[in-house]
Image: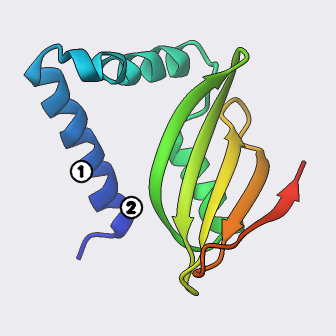
Amino acid sequence: MRSFKARFLTSLFAMVALWSAAGSMPAWASDAHDHDRARRALEAGEVIPLRNIIERVELAHPGQIIEIELERDDGRWLYELKLLRADGSMAKLLVDARDGSVLSVTGRKTGGERRKEERN
């Protein structure tokens, strides 16, 4: 049985391949080039590999990663990860894509109440 991470990454790569094969779609035009921007940032040494980020997050923040985004904010690359915890609560982690440090963690209890857990 394949792990969730392996299934997730396989699905992610399949979606990117399908989007690329489908050509340019106006509503998704910026998304169509996100994987290219991410690859260039990795090759330029501006970000560390996503695999390293996932390993670090899984060690420090147990749960199932359900969404990952790579964003550029004020010239800084950031990974935003959403994870589902064993107790059913959600957490959003903001991670510096250059060095893997967790910048902030915000959580939401199952009732929808938000809470800030840590801020570096």
Q: Amino acid at mark 1?
A: Ser
On screen, residue 104 versus residue 73, left or right, reads right
Few, some or many residues within 10 Å of mark 1 (<14, 14–19, 20+): few
Q: Residue at x 53, y 82 (%)?
A: 88
Residue 25, picture quadrant: top left
Residue 84, position as x, y percentages in the image: 52, 71
Q: Residue at x 21, y 39 (%)?
A: 15
Callout in the foreground (1, 2): 1
Which of disc 2 and disc 1 is earlier in sequence? 2
Residue 103, position as x, y percentages in the image: 80, 45
Viewer-side residue, 73 vs 102? 73
Q: Is residue 9 above or below residue 114?
A: above
What residue is shown with label 2? 5
On screen, residue 111 versus residue 103, left or right, reads left
- The residue lying furthest to the left in this view is 22
Q: Quadrant of the N terminus?
A: bottom left
Q: Residue at x 64, y 19 (%)?
A: 46
Q: Residue at x 54, y 17 (%)?
A: 41
Viewer-side residue, 37 vs 25? 25
On screen, residue 15 versus residue 114, left or right, reads left
On screen, residue 41 versus residue 46, left or right, reads left
Residue 105, position as x, y percentages in the image: 74, 57
Residue 63, picture quadrant: bottom right
What residue is shown with label 1? 11
Q: Is residue 103 above or below residue 75?
A: below
